[in-house]
Image (tube, rainbow, N blue to C red):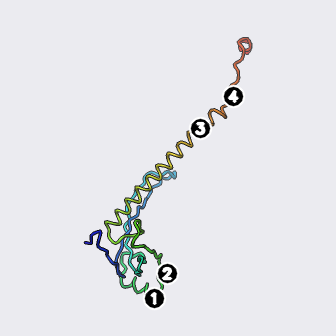
Amino acid sequence: MATAKEKVVPKVGDIWHRVENTSYGSIDEWGTVTSVTTKLSKYKLVVVKVTPKGVWLVYYWAGESLESVLNETAKGSVVMLRERRFVRLDAVRRYAYPTEKEAMEGFVARKRRQVKILQSQLRTASEALAAGEFELKTRFAPEVPEPAPKEVAELAL
């Protein structure tokens, strides 16, 4: 295995990896979400072109032969059939990685950052909600009618 100082040179046909999360939900007959399950989806991408700065990748699906993907790419038809991704070799954050371990580390880093962003948005929304509710109670509070004098109340009976 290559150390951090060794530079691995990718080749056409190498398999790179990406990890994403996928959520599935169940809905009852009233349209209420009853359960949500989150699973990790692991994808393989094939290096179809190597440049001095990075690699071009396309998704490699189960059941496909690597040769068919590379032949398809060589003919130029891959542009029409598949999404191509360019990944810089010197990038810290990448779309895909040369090893499954690096792909999982990248996924964990993305999710940690997503959690921090969403926590910040939740904190901001909670503060805005509290400010709005306070304004609603203080500025737009319904006017309370003055109580009727005791004599008027007795006459009403």
Q: In which quarter of the image is residue 18?
A: bottom left
The residue most toward the left is 1
Give the structural element (helix, strand or loop) at label 2: helix
The x and y percentages for residue 134 are 59, 35
Q: Which amino acid does label 2 sit on?
A: Val
Residue 75: mark in rendering: 1
How far separated are the C-alphas under marks 2 and 4? 67 Å
Left or right: 152, with 71 as reference point: right
Sequence-earlier tag: 2 or 4: 2
The x and y percentages for residue 128 are 56, 43
Residue under label 2, please give it. Answer: 79
Residue drawn 50% across and 45% down? 123
Crowding near the residue tagged with mark 4, few <14, some 14–19, many ≥20 C-alpha atoms within 10 Å: few
How far separated are the C-alphas under marks 4 and 3? 17 Å
Sequence-earlier tag: 4 or 3: 3
Residue under label 4, please give it. Answer: 143
Q: Which of 25 and 126 is in front in this view?
A: 126
Residue under label 3, please give it. Answer: 133
Name above or below for residue 93 compared with residue 8: above
